[in-house]
Image (cartoon, rainbow, N blue to C red):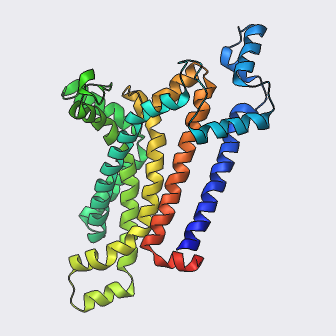
Amino acid sequence: MSVFLARRLATFFATLAVASLLVFAVLELLPGNVAQVMLGDTATPESIAALEKKLGLDRPASERYITWIAGLVQGETANSLSYGTPTAELIVERLRVTVPLALLAMALTTVLALAFGIYAAARHNRAGDVGVMLASQLGIAVPNFWFAIMLILLFAVQLQWVSAGGFPGWSEADGGGLGPALQSLALPAIALALVQAAILARVTRSSVLEVMREDYVRTARAKGLSSRATLWRHVLRNAMIPVLTIMGLQFANLITGTIVVENVFVLPGIGRLVFQAIANRDLVVVRDVVMLLVAIVIVVNFVVDVLYALVDPRLRASDA
């Protein structure tokens, strides 16, 4: 296990280093004047020169990259040009909305996908299986922002059960609280979860069906074990291996996928921050947010690799 973890950690840090280089290169080294882009076409040469000095663009690219990475490691980031505060403070504040939204959506995705995927596999080629597959195909085909708009029209406009958007905050002193905050995240989480649950349900069904065809499953049934007992004792543990991989990738997708849904529901999360930074040409914020999203995807993939090895000991043995 130690060899396996060492190799995965080496891959993790190497991937993170390459990703940081790519993010820096895209936003800093592309042809054109970054200060000109941020200030617009009407900027004077003096203001462009002042911004270049402020951003350190007058220094070599390698020095700027090292300064940026060192700041990220120490938790010190450059100030946003639009807000005048460190980007780390802006990101942490917005993550208080985005992370709970992604976790809530992931919980809904897991419950729906496992329930319907196992249900469909247990009723293979019967009406329940066909119904789940049709519903999942529809869920995959329809984008989550369309689901978001339909949910707003139904629950906010027609039924008027919830507000159409906004976030009251987690603090009761600000007029919010745990209950109102979770209520404001419910519809966005459902919109995000429906598409991901459709994908995961199909993967769960296929994985369970594949394991059910194995010899040891037929042996268990031949010894008199019921279908339900066989499913829970022998099938699900082995069937969860590919499902865990997809779940990890989906959680990373949910973090990045909140960008569109947050704007539909006017939630003050990472998605709104990115859109506002792009509109304000605040490339300092864009760079740090993009790096954060990339790092989240890499971290989640690393965690999935470790969980994958815990579920399937053959992976640890192959790396020993």
- Horizontally, residue 148 falls left or right of residue 300, namely left
Q: Is residue 190 above or below residue 35?
A: below
In percent of width and height, residue 22 lies at 69, 43
In percent of width and height, residue 163 lies at 25, 25
- Horizontally, residue 181 falls left or right of residue 316, namely left
Locate the C terminus and report the quarter of the image it occupies: bottom right
Query: Closer to the camera, 236 or 151?
Result: 236
In percent of width and height, residue 23 lies at 66, 39
Query: Closer to the camera, 193 or 183?
Result: 183
Q: Quadrant of residue 286?
A: top right
Q: Residue at x 29, y 25 (%)?
A: 168
Q: Is residue 80 above or below residue 128?
A: above
- Horizontally, residue 192 falls left or right of residue 179, namely right
Q: Residue at x 49, y 27 (%)?
A: 273
Q: Residue at x 48, y 59 (%)?
A: 303
Q: Residue at x 28, y 37 (%)?
A: 186
For the view shown, which residue lies furthest in the bottom direction? 223
Q: Quadrant of residue 151?
A: top left
Query: Closer to the camera, 82 or 250?
Result: 82
Is residue 243 in sight in this rendering? yes
